Image (spheres, rainbow, N blue to C red):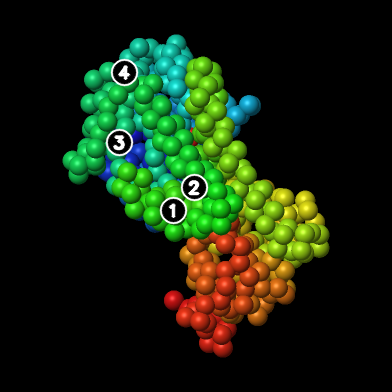
């Protein structure tokens, strides 16, 4: 069995390292972040990912998964080195590849015998060839260092299950040897029937960018449809549902609302746009520019709605924001649409109180000025307006009758289009949902006035 190393223990790298150990491999992982390595070595996940911490502990306790800060140790230990460092947005929307090159430059001097370096980070097409040339120029093993690209498709919040049951495994390879090694690494999921697609390096790099660009396009398409619905007096929710039943279209990524965010889709769309322009494919570049512009527009639209819902001015208005993470079941606030909305609310003079079940400490690090409330009730106290910005199940189960007793005005904007609007309306709330008729009226069937439990989040 090849011995595996993982370089970079962020969202991607740590979940991959744990998964590799779960598959039975001996794994050694490295990060330049000293604090992170200290934490993961103690079996503590440095971020919120359902199910990850217990698996991390199991595998560190068994000794199958260890951590280090020494590239020399990594080089000596590994037969297969997975590269999982960040590729954030750089100048002019291009991917910043400095961590990719720093990590491979740090590793290469210790590659003294035949081995395989496997890129998992999301990179512009052409990066893999540059990486292998640089490594071979430095490594004592020279051309005996092979390279493959194995893009990752996991979703934050579902990383453990996505690792265990991936839709497919994509391998970009330069040799049969690399393919054979990776077949060994992924023997268990392949035996379980996971589709394997083997291709050249460039195509593998592009598969990941194409997947994210397509998903982002789907989100922006439904958000543009929401705007059409508003203009035409139609309702985007039944429209999206009817579209989604078409097997050629599918229901996922067809939820209208505040748009996508996080550490992947926004920066990958921009980086791919830059690549498309560099390659002279201007139609793809302009399609992706539009996708990005529609996505950013959703944030402005929510602020516009908020202004309208507070009689034209947010100055001095108490606004409660429910949800800070870019998506539920994650504490990731990178390029979070909710944080962007908070910034605009503050800039317009609102007094903003925020709540999130998992992302408050990450948000507080980058936005210390916001008022962080430990409970939904405290966040909503005396609010003039509630904004529902991240689709946590905790918010779907709020009792609007109980919450109504805490606020000054019963006005809510459901920017994730997933609350039971008729229930909220029956509790006397004015409910605004982008892409839907402006205020949802009360309905007798839902009229539960007087039946409130007094609890904002019903027990169970
Ligand atoms: N987060 C996801 O869900 C996801 C999914 C698929 C693909 N990806 C891609 O995976 C890559 C990593 O993303 P992430 O979300 O894990 O980022 P991250 O910022 O959470 O993690 C990156 C890690 O790399 C470490 N690092 C940076 N330079 C290093 C170096 N020279 N040596 C060792 N470690 C170094 C950082 O300290 C950090 O811990 C990106 O290319 C991203 O696009 C991410």
Q: State the CA–CA distance, disc 1 to disc 3.
A: 30 Å
Q: Which residue is mark 4?
A: 174
- First-in-chain label (4 vs 3): 3
Q: Nearer the viewer, mark 4 or mark 1?
A: 1
Marks 4 and 1 sit apart, C-alpha to C-alpha, by 42 Å
Q: Earlier in the sequence, mark 4 or mark 1?
A: 4
> What x and y, as percent, mark residue 426?
56, 78
Q: Nearer the viewer, residue 181 or 284?
A: 284
- Residue placed most toward the observer, 203 or 159: 203
Residue 74, by quadrant, is top left
Q: Which residue is mark 2?
A: 222
Per the model, the C-alpha gap separating discs 1 and 2 is 7 Å
x then y, percent, for residue 58:
35, 53
Tell which circle, 4 or 2, labels the residue nearer the N-terminal end.
4
Can residue 139 be seen from the camera position used here? no
Q: Is the CB of the residue bearing disc 2 within 8 angstroms of ligand 1?
A: no
Instruction: For mark 3, give the secondary structure.
Output: strand
Residue at image coords 23%, 31%? 183
Q: Residue at x 52, y 57 (%)?
A: 234
- Tags 1 and 3 in contact by the CB under 8 Å rule? no
Is the residue 448 above or below the residue 131 in the image? below
Gap in angstroms between the C-alphas marked 4 and 2: 39 Å
Name the secondary structure under disc 2. helix
Tell me the SS state at disc 4: loop
Mark 1 vs ligand 1: CB under 8 Å?
Answer: no
Residue position for label 1: 240
Report the residue at 40% width, 56% height from top.
Answer: 241
Q: Report the Cα–Cα distance between label 2 and label 3.
A: 29 Å
Residue 157 horizontal/vertical position (percent): 44, 52
Where does label 3 land, which residue?
Answer: 169
Is label 3 within 8 A of ligand 1 (CB to nearest ligand atom)?
A: no
């Amino acid at each position: 069995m090849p011995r595996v190393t993982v370089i970079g223990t962020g969202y991607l790298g740590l979940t991959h390292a744990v998964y590799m150990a779960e598959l039975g491999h001996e794994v050694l992982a490295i990060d330049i972040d000293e604090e992170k390595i200290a934490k993961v070595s103690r079996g503590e996940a440095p971020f919120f990912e359902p199910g990850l911490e217990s698996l991390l502990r199991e595998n560190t306790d068994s000794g199958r998964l260890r951590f280090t800060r020494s590239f020399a140790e990594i080089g000596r230990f590994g037969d297969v080195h997975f590269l999982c460092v960040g590729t954030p947005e750089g100048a002019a929307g291009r991917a910043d590849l400095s961590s990719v090159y720093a990590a491979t430059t740090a590793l290469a001097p210790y590659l003294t015998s035949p081995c395989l370096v496997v890129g998992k980070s999301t990179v512009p097409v052409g990066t893999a060839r540059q990486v292998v040339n640089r490594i071979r120029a430095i490594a004592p093993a020279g051309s005996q260092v092979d390279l493959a690209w194995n893009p990752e498709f996991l979703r934050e919040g579902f990383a453990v299950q996505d690792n265990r049951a991936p839709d497919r495994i994509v391998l970009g390879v330069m040799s049969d040897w690399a393919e054979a090694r990776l077949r060994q690494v992924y023997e268990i999921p392949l035996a379980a029937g996971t589709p394997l697609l083997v291709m050249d390096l460039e195509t593998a790099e592009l598969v990941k960018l194409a997947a994210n660009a397509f998903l982002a396009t789907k989100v922006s398409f439904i958000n543009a449809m929401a705007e059409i619905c508003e203009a035409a007096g139609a309702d985007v929710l039944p429209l999206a549902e009817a579209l989604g039943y078409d097997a050629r279209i599918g229901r996922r990524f067809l939820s209208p609302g505040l748009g996508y965010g996080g550490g992947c889709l926004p920066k990958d769309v921009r980086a791919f746009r830059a690549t498309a322009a560099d390659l002279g494919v201007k139609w793809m570049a302009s399609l992706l520019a539009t996708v990005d512009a529609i996505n950013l527009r959703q944030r402005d639209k929510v602020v516009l709605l908020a202004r309208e819902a507070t009689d034209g001015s947010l100055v001095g208005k108490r606004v409660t924001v429910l949800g800070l993470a870019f998506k539920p079941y994650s504490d990731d606030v990178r390029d979070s649409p909710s944080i962007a909305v908070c910034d605009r609310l503050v800039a317009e003079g609102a007094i903003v109180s925020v709540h999130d079940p998992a992302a408050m400490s990450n948000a507080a690090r980058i936005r210390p000025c916001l008022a962080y409330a430990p409970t939904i009730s405290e966040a909503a106290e005396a609010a003039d307006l509630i904004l529902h910005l991240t689709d946590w199940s905790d918010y779907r189960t709020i009792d609007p009758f109980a919450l109504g007793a805490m606020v000054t005005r019963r006005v809510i904007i459901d920017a994730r289009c997933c609350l039971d609007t008729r229930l909220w309306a029956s509790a006397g709330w004015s409910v605004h949902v982008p892409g839907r008729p402006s205020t949802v009226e009360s309905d007798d069937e839902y009229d539960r006035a007087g039946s409130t439990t007094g609890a904002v989040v019903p027990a169970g």
